[in-house]
Image (tube, helix red, strand yellow):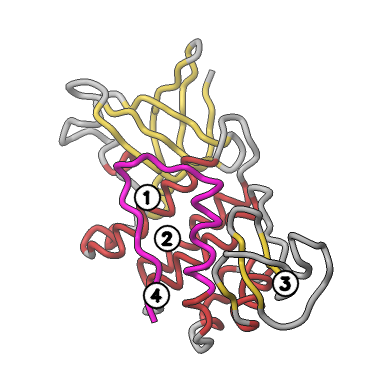
Amino acid sequence: MHIITQGVVLRSAQYSENDRMVTLLTPDRGLVEAIARGSRRPKSPLVAAVEPFCAGEYTLFAQGSRLSMQQCRVMENFYHLRFDVDRLTAAVYVSSLCEASAQPEEDCRSMFALLLKTLAYLENSDLPLPLLISAFEMRLMPILGYLPRMEACVLCGRPFQGGGRFDARLGGAVCPDCPSTAPEMTLEARRIIYKAPRTDYTRVDLLEDKPAWREAARLYRPFVSERIELPEKRIIPSPPED
């Protein structure tokens, strides 16, 4: 049976002397692993299709429980990411978050669209990389069902005004009246953490002029780490500094 689906290569690894095992994020089938036979040969038509971050329309052949890659119509390869180590590290990180959180046979349309937008910004935008990474994190977590509670205290449940603290483990804001050892949070950072998941990624530039985005990014990273476990060997970009 042939399957035609869009996909982004999250990871590509040697499978045999001439073949590669490719992990794809697809919008309609979630996480997919397929063997790209012959793709390690220099003249293979699949050489470009198995490169990390390649986005295209993939034709897969299902035989039993295994999928093999037959062909690909490349739409975007984000080639220039490979020439900047910082941009490459950022792209690997966001791809790793998708790989760690997506599931096979899952509707991943929102995650797929977010990843494509983020890779495009990482390749072409002059915005700070930590800002682009944090904006991705703040939009990914709600897709996975993790939306921080920011309008009320996670301990007492009461709405409150102003800043407070952000408890990454409990998943939200802590009011000044409740005892907590969580990091302090300004009102400006609280507003960013609240609004960012509700704003399209293409408006990420609106945050650049708000100094509190760096604080919000540092507070939010542990919230992500508490809920998505990445392999230890993966490089995780450091949160931004003041």
Question: Is 10 rendered above or below residue 19?
Answer: below
Q: Mark 1 — residue?
A: 53
Q: Nearer the viewer, residue 56 or 172?
A: 172
Q: Nearer the viewer, residue 135 or 73?
A: 135
Q: Answer yes or no: do the residues labelled 4 and 1 have beta carbons within 8 Å?
A: no
How far apart are labels 4 and 2 at the CA level? 10 Å
Q: Amino acid at mark 2?
A: Leu
The answer to whether 79 appears left or right of 211 in the picture is left
- Label whose residue precedes the other's in the sequence (2 or 1): 1
Q: Which residues are magenta?
A: 216-242
Q: Which mark is residue 114?
A: none
Using a 10 Å C-alpha cutoff, classify the residue at mark 4 as few (fewer than 14 neighbours), some (14 to 19) or many (20 or more). Answer: few
Magenta stretch: helix, strand or loop mostly? loop
Using a 10 Å C-alpha cutoff, classify the residue at mark 3 as few (fewer than 14 neighbours), some (14 to 19) or many (20 or more). Answer: many
* Quarter of the rendering containing residue 190: bottom right
Q: Mark 2 — residue?
A: 119
Q: Amino acid at mark 3?
A: Cys
How far apart are labels 4 and 1 at the CA level? 17 Å
Using a 10 Å C-alpha cutoff, classify the residue at mark 1 as few (fewer than 14 neighbours), some (14 to 19) or many (20 or more). Answer: many
Residue, far right: 158
Residue lying at 82% horizontally and 62% vertically, measured from the top left: 157
Q: Answer yes or no: do the residues labelled 4 and 2 have beta carbons within 8 Å?
A: no
Q: Amino acid at mark 4?
A: Ser
Q: Mark 3 — residue?
A: 175
Kind of element beneath mark 3: loop
How far apart are labels 3 and 4 at the CA level? 37 Å
Question: Between tags 3 and 4, which lies in front?
Answer: 3
Residue lying at 67% horizontally and 60% vertically, measured from the top left: 148
The quadrant of the picture occupied by the C terminus is bottom left
Image coordinates of residue 219 in percent, x first then y, are 52, 67
- Label whose residue precedes the other's in the sequence (3 or 2): 2
- Label whose residue precedes the other's in the sequence (3 or 4): 4
